[in-house]
Image (cartoon, rainbow, N blue to C red):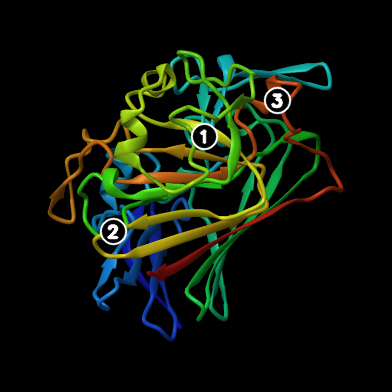
């Protein structure tokens, strides 16, 4: 069942909150602004239902205090070195919104757009057209995002895009998870990532181009490990990431798993994307309060399934190019369970 409610006006347009509820009482709420997921309400081991994602009740906070909470980011997720790239011998300059880099699509990326929304059963379908040279990117890009909540307690996020001229695309969802249902630091969460390697970063948080083994490092999440224990292993790259993780992991076949011991909630993530960027919420804390609780460093963590950041400038990375006649297509499935 899908319901909807106007919660605000933005530049003369209504901001609509859509809510999908499945037969088990699991509930997803999302906005037509940025496709922002504001709520994902699930039961713990005792049946207590809580919101396991970071989101505001007041829409205006997304305009002033939001490091991409719950949003779809694009046209290119992650950082592009020096906010520039060359495609077919033509150089494109982008907005520098992260030091000298372009981050998550620029100053007014997809997270700051009002999307057209249609409903199809238990699916919300979001559509957006990004004009040629918007934020500096070539090609008119037509994007369709699907949010489906199943009765198997799975949230399926689908991504599709087409272009009228050659461009680059990298889309992801930037939801911050906290399976405790609070804003307490996620340091006791246990994380498993099926990745034999990760991408070390420069001091500007751009991948160096190296594909480094996780063996014997603080980046070995092949077996479940508490975040606090992983951080205790120390690694120069932890400091590079801003006192924590903000790194791409190159995925093997398998499932990303996040578990929280007090609620015994578990999140299992399956994707067809080549990588996941694990951001441990290191820089959170300046946003103030949310739902009557103070936002702290590590109040939530992101598991952003996507292509590799800065791929357009790194020939060894899988291509992020999209040509006319081709379709960008991807799906990530989030399964909500207890244990």
Q: Position of residue 60 (x, y in %)?
A: 27, 49
Q: Height in image: 315 above or below 179?
A: above
Q: Position of residue 211 (x, y in %)?
A: 64, 24
Residue 323 location, quadrant = top right
Give the quarter of the figure containing the C terminus. Answer: bottom left
Q: Height in image: 63 above or below 157?
A: above
Q: Is residue 299 left or right of residue 269?
A: left
As helix, strand or loop, the secondary structure at mark 1 comes to: loop
The mark lying in front, picked from 2 and 1, is 2
For marks 1 and 3, the one nearer the N-term is 1
As helix, strand or loop, the secondary structure at mark 3 comes to: helix
Asked if the residue at tag 1 contacts the one at tag 2, i.e. Cβ–Cβ closer than 8 Å, the answer is no
Q: Distance of mark 2 from mark 3, alpha carbons?
A: 40 Å
**Residue 155 visible to an observer of this rendering:** yes
Residue visible at 44% across and 60% down in the picture: 267
For marks 2 and 1, the one nearer the N-term is 1
Numbered mark located on residue 329 in the image: none
Q: Distance of mark 2 from mark 1, alpha carbons?
A: 32 Å
Q: Position of residue 74 (x, y in %)?
A: 57, 40
Residue visible at 57% across and 46% down in the picture: 194
250 or 172: nearer the viewer: 250
Residue under numbered circle 3: 312
Residue under numbered circle 2: 261
Residue under numbered circle 1: 104
Asked if the residue at tag 3 contacts the one at tag 1, i.e. Cβ–Cβ closer than 8 Å, the answer is no
Near mark 3 (Cα within 10 A), the count class, few <14, some 14-19 or many ≥20, is many
């Amino acid at each position: 069942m899908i319901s909807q409610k106007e919660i605000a006006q933005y530049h003369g347009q209504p901001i609509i909150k859509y809510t999908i509820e499945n037969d088990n009482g699991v509930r997803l709420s999302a906005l037509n602004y940025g496709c922002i997921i504001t709520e994902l309400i699930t039961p713990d081991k005792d049946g207590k239902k809580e919101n396991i994602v970071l989101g505001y009740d007041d829409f205006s906070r997304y305009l002033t205090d939001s490091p991409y909470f719950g949003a779809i980011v694009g046209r290119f997720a992650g950082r592009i070195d020096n906010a520039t790239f060359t495609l077919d011998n033509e150089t494109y300059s982008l907005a520098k919104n992260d030091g000298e880099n372009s981050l998550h699509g620029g100053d007014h990326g997809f997270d700051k757009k009002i999307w057209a929304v249609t409903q199809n059963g238990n699916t919300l379908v979001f559509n957006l057209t990004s004009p040629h040279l918007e934020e500096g990117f070539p090609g008119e890009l037509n994007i369709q995002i699907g949010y489906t909540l199943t009765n198997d307690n799975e949230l399926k996020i689908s991504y599709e895009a087409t272009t009228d001229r050659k461009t680059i695309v990298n889309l992801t969802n930037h939801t911050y998870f906290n399976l405790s249902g609070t804003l307490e630091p996620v340091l006791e969460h246990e994380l498993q990532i099926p990745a034999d390697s990760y991408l070390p970063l420069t001091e500007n948080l751009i991948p160096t181009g190296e594909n480094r083994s996780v063996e014997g490092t603080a980046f070995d999440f092949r077996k479940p490990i508490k975040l606090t224990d992983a951080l205790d292993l120390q690694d120069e790259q932890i400091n590079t990431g801003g006192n924590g993780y903000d790194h791409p992991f190159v995925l093997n076949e398998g499932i990303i798993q996040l578990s929280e011991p007090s609620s015994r909630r578990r999140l299992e993530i399956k994707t067809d994307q080549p990588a996941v960027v694990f951001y441990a919420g290191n820089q959170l804390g300046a946003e103030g309060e949310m739902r009557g609780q103070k936002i702290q460093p590590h109040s939530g963590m992101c598991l952003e399934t996507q292509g590799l950041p800065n791929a357009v400038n790194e020939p060894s990375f899988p291509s992020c190019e999209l040509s006319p006649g081709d379709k960008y297509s991807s799906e990530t499935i989030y399964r909500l369970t207890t244990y």
